[in-house]
Image: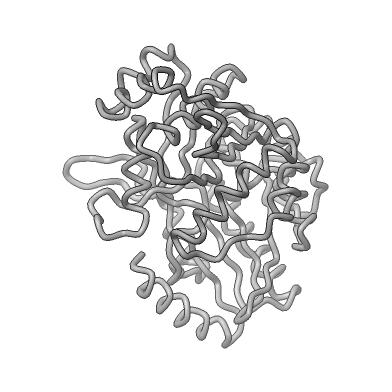
Amino acid sequence: MKVEIKQITASELQTFYKNFENEKTFLQSGTYGQWRESIGETIFYYGVFEDQKLIGTALFQKIKSRFKTYLHCPHGPLIGLHRHNPQAKDTIWEMFLSAYKKLGKTEKCDLIRISPIQREILIQNQDKPIINPLKKTLHKCRFTPAATHLINPELTWVLDIDRPLEDVLKTMKKSTRYEINRIEKCGIKVSHGNADTDLDVFWELHSETVKRQGFVPFPRSQTEKQLKAFGDNCFIFNAEIEQKNYSSSIIIFDDNAGYYHQGASTYCKLPCSHATLWEAIKFAQERGCKEFNFWGVSPEENKKHPWHGLSKFKRGFGGVEREYIHVHDFEITPKAKLNRLIEWHRKRKRKY
């Protein structure tokens, strides 16, 4: 078995992503990489080859912040299961992590970061859960759990929509189902599109949400470039009552799922936020998607978490929780240790 890890094109990575049948999210798509390049990030596209056959891909972002420069592999890499020799996967992972470390040093980074889309627990036995062996591989390669909070959600909520809508409704919480049944009666109208006028609506509500919740927003130009890069795989769903807009959601699509990427709203007693997501779920099903990914949620038992209310809203639609391995870092320079302290303090301050 000869394994090589080398650079590929965004197009090659996108083709592999589209045909990849295991768990994945748009964060490892070539389209995502092209969007991030358009806002000034440096993106690396790598392929994992076994006997000259492409069996895996990885997208790396090079990110510069005030305290560090680092590479990040979000929800990656995507590596196919080795059917003939399962043990070979551990070897491939070790070779991949070694190549990743080398790239980080070449790019003069302070650390490299990986958020693998690998389940934390493989089998949930009553006596003792079976933990993903990748955690041991990461430890062996001197990667340590990062001090930061949830990155590229590692706790997410996913709804199966590969079934009749009637069945989807049945598995929702009673209160959510009640609100969805009220949408039409309340005169709520939902439109979708990806034109500037659609973004105008979202941005007006987004600006109000920023003031209400007090977080630092991304510039509008970043979302404009997102819409341009994803094209007909990204739509804004806007809910209005009597020509007044109350809720807006940005949804990204691939061949397998719809992803609730961003949301904005203003106060309304009526189910406008339910309306945008219900319309997006139906639209995703029409496109042939099998899942609707509500993106990140907080631990259900942590009622003090800043995301608790939003997470409760998402869980109301029914679905299952997926927990992935926590983000890990490989520290290269002394600045990485300073960064760890900063991120630990930030996490504690924000109550994550």
x and y percent of residue 165 in the render? 43, 14
Closest to the observer, 241 or 105: 241
Colouring rule applied to residues:
one colour
Q: Residue furthest left?
A: 127
Q: Is residue 51 visible?
A: no
User: What residue sits 57% from the left and 41% below the top?
Assistant: 25
x and y percent of residue 314 in the render? 38, 39
Q: Is residue 336 visible?
A: yes
- Quarter location, residue 39: bottom right
Q: Quadrant of the N terminus?
A: top right
User: What residue sits 57% from the left and 55% below the top?
Assistant: 207
Q: Quadrant of the C terminus?
A: bottom left
Q: Residue furthest front?
A: 242
User: What residue sits 52% from the left and 67% below the top?
Assistant: 141
Closest to the observer, 11 or 35: 35
Closest to the observer, 146 or 80: 146
Is the residue 59 above or below the residue 64 in the image?
above
**For this view, does 15 lie left or right of residue 145?**
right
Is the residue 43 above or below the residue 22 in the image?
below
**For this view, does 200 lie left or right of residue 272?**
right
